Amino acid sequence: MKFRIIASLILGLCFLRLGFCQPINDPFLTRLYNQLHASPQQDKYRKIAPMPIGCVYLQREGEGEKEMRQHFKTMKELGFTALKQIMTRPGTTIEQVQLLALDEGINPFWYGDGGWEEITPSLLKKLKIKETSSMDEIRNHPAMQSHQKEVLRMRILHIQDFAKTSPDKKGPKERSVAFEPEVGPRGFELSEIGKKLFVEWVKKEYKTIDMLNEVWCQNYVGLQTDQATAFRDWSDFDGRWEKVPNNEYRHLRDILRFKADHGVEGIKKNIRLFQNFDKDAVFRGGGEMSLFYPHAWWCVDMESVAKSMDSAGCFYPSMHFAWHYDEVKHELTRPFYMQASQMHDYFKGGWSAAIEATGGPQQFSGGKGGNGFTTDSGTMTQFIYSQLAAGFKGFGLWTWNARDAGWEAGEYALLDRNQEVTDRARKVGRIGKAMNKYRDELWAARKEPVVGILIDWDNDAMWAAMTKAGRDSFLMEAVKGRIGAARALMNANVPFEFVTKTDLIRGLSGRYKVIMAPSFVSLDKKLMPVFTDYVKAGGRLVMDLPGPYYDEQAVLFSTKAGSSFESLFGTKLADYQYSGINRIWTLENEKLKGFTVDLKTTSAKILARYGNGNPAITENFLGKGSAVFLGYEAAMACFKPGNPNWEKKFIQYVLGSKTSPYFCSNALVYRLSGEKADHYFVINDQESIQTQINFGQMKYSRLEDAVTGEILSSDKPFKVNSFDGKWIRALK
C-alpha cells in the first residue's frame, strides 16, 4: 500500500507539467492512466479480469425448479455466465433461485468472478495451486472453482439471514441510484433540510465571508440582494443568502455542486455499510439515467460517482433504447459508442461495465412510450461491440425472458414471447464466449486516442445556471457540443476519448495529440497554464464558440492584450456576435447558425475568414504546438446527423496535419490496443458491405474474427452483414 501511494505521487509530480519526465516508451501515458483510479480493489479486478455475461431472469407463471434449471442450462450453453438480477413470483425467494443458478454453473450475482474471494498466494497454497500457473489456469482450476462456488453459496445464505431482520426484508444495498431527492428535487430548489445543509456546505467551502463575496460576485454591479451590499459576515449571510438574484450565476452553480456532493456522500455511506457486510462482494455506482441528460442540472456528477468506486467496485450506466436516447431522436448506432465511452472515460483504468442494458425489442415502454426499435442480432452485435470498444468489461442485459403481463410484457428480452431462444440470444452468447476467451487481453487493452474531447462539470453547471431565468434551451448546449464533436470524429474514424478537467490537472494532457474543448461557455482559469504547457510541448488545442465567455465565477473571461488567453491563442475576442436571426454570416460559403465573434489577432495566423472578410478561424504557434480558435459553433454544427460539410470542416480544423492511425472508407471502426493483439470493432450501419481496414504503420502477423475464428487477410476485403458488426483480433 505504501509503495502504491509513493508511486502514485511520483507519477503525479512527473506528469503535472507536460514535458517533464514524460517517458519515451509510454506515448499514451498508460502508466499514469492506470494510476488515476488505482486501489487494492481495482487491482483485484485487474488480476481476476471479471467479464460477466449477464442477464435478468424473471420467473413466469408455472415455472418451478425444473423449468428454472432448464433456463440456466440454456444460458450456460449459449455463453451467459451470470444473473444480473432475479425477479420472482410470490412463494419463491430470490435466494432459492440463486442457489439453483449456482448449482447449474451460472454465477447468481451480476458481477460474476469480480465477487470472488481475492486470489492471494496464501489462497493458492491452501488450494494446492502452483503460483507459477497462468491466471487463466488459476481461474479454471477445479479447486479454485469449487472454493469460489462455496464463497458465493455462503454469501447467498448470509444475505438471506440479513434480510430476515432488515426492515424492508431485503439484502444490503449493493448499488447507487443516480439521484436522491433528500435535499431537494433536480435543479435549484432546496428542501428545508437542504437549505440548512447548503449553508453549512458554503461555510466549509469558502471559509471566510470575503472569499464568498468574491466568488459569488457580490462586489460586482447588480448582483447583490435587495440591500445592494455584499455580505458583512456569516450572520448576515444566514439571513440574506436566499435573496441573491438569479442573474448571479455562481451561487446557482454552487447549489448544483452541493447537491451533487451530497449525493456522492450518500453513496460512500452505502459503500461502507455494504463492505462491512461483505468485503469481497462488488458495489456498483452510476445509475439509471441517460448519459445525454444535462447531469449538472440533475445534480449528479458522474465523475465524482466514478471516483467513489475506486475502492468499492464497478461503475455502470443504464443503456436502454426506449429510455436513454430521446435527446438524439432515438438514433442508436453512434450514440451507443458515445455513451459507453463517456461513462468509461470518467473511470479511466477502473472497472466499468454495461450492467443495466437492453436485451431485446421494445415498442410500448420507455419514458413517454411509442419509441419502437428493431432489436435483432445485428442491433445487439453493434450494441455490445460499441461497449467493448469503449472499454467496458462485461454486461447485464434486461432481460433473459420478458415479463408476461402488464408493463413491458413481451419487451426487452433475449428470448422471444414464447420463451424460445432467438438469433440475438445465440449471437450475444457467442460474443460472450469470445469476451471470456480474450478477457485478459481485453482487460489489458487501452484506447489510443488522437483527440481528447474535454468535459467539465462546471461548464455544464454554468449553462444550467443560465436557464434559471427561463432560457431552457441553454440546458443541453454542452451535451450537444460533445455529441457533435464525437459524431464528426467517429464518422472520420478518428480515435478519441473524453477527458475531464481533473484528468488534465493530474497530467493526462500529453496522452492526446489534440484536445478539443466544445461548447464551453465557462472556462476554469486553472486550465490556462495546463493548456499553455500542453501547447508548448507540442499539443494542438482547439476551442470553438461560445468559449470562453465566462470564467468559473461567471465573470467575463479576460482576452485582452497580455491575458493568458491572448498569449495562448494570439488573438483578442472583441465582441461576440450571432448569425441566423437578424443577420446571416457565412464561412466558406456555408451559412452559420449561432455564435460568431469579432477576432482581433495579435500573433495568430488567420486560417479562414467570414464572408464579410473578418477573421473567423485562427491558429497561434507557441513552442512546439499551436492553439486554434474556431469562430463558430463547430461542434454544435455536427450535433445532428446528415451534416457532412460541417463535419469535414470540423475534422480539417481540429486535426490540422494530424491523422488517424487507421482508415476505413465505408464503416465505423473502433480500436483497442494491447500488447499481444489489437482489437478492432467494425460497425456497418447500412446494407451488407465488403470493406477493408487500412492499418497504416501497424503490422500484424494474423487477423481473425474473434467470434467465429475465421482467418482474414489484410490485403482482401471482408464482408460485414447488413446493420451488423465484426470483431477483428489482430495479432502482433
Image (cartoon, rainbow, N blue to C red):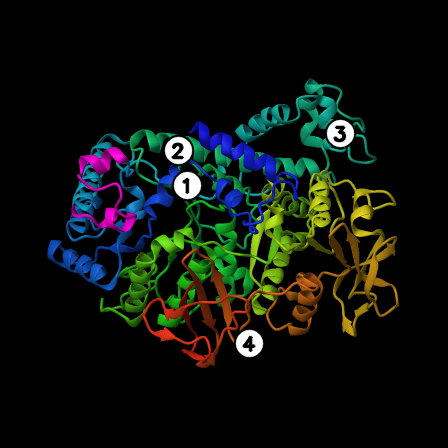
**Quadrant (top left, top right, bottom left, bottom right) of the N terminus:** top left
The local secondary structure at tag 2 comes to helix
- In space, the residues marked 2 and 1 are separated at their CA atoms by 8 Å
Decide: is 186 above or below 490.
above
Q: CA distance from mark 3 to mark 4?
A: 53 Å
What is the number of the mark on residue 214?
Answer: 3
Whether 655 is among the magenta residues is no
Location of residue 192 in the rendering, given as x and y in whole percent from the top left corner: 55, 29
Q: Find the magenta span and give its range.
A: 121-142
Does residue 663 appear to the left or right of 58 in the view shown? Answer: right
> Cα distance, mark 3 to mark 2?
36 Å
Q: In the image, 174: left or right of 146? A: right
Q: In front of the other: label 4 or label 2?
A: 4
Residue 665, labelled with which disc?
Answer: 4
| Numbered mark located on residue 176 in the image | 1
Q: Residues within 10 Å of mark 2 (few under 14, many from 20)?
A: some
Q: Earlier in the sequence, mark 3 or mark 1?
A: 1
- The residue type indicated by label 3 comes to Glu
Residue corresponding to mark 2:
270
Residue 61, given in percent of the width and then of the height, sits at 18, 58
Q: Quadrant of residue 156?
A: top left
Q: Nearer the viewer, mark 3 or mark 4?
A: 4
Query: Which of the pair 467/52 is nearer the observer?
Result: 52
SS class, disc 4: loop
Q: Is residue 282 left or right of residue 700?
A: left
Badge 4 crowding class, 10 Å Cα cut-off, few under 14, some 14 to 19, many 20 or more, is few
Q: Position of residue 586 (x, y in %)?
A: 80, 70
Query: How much space separates mark 3 and mark 1, taking CA atoms?
Result: 36 Å
Amino acid bearing label 4: Ser
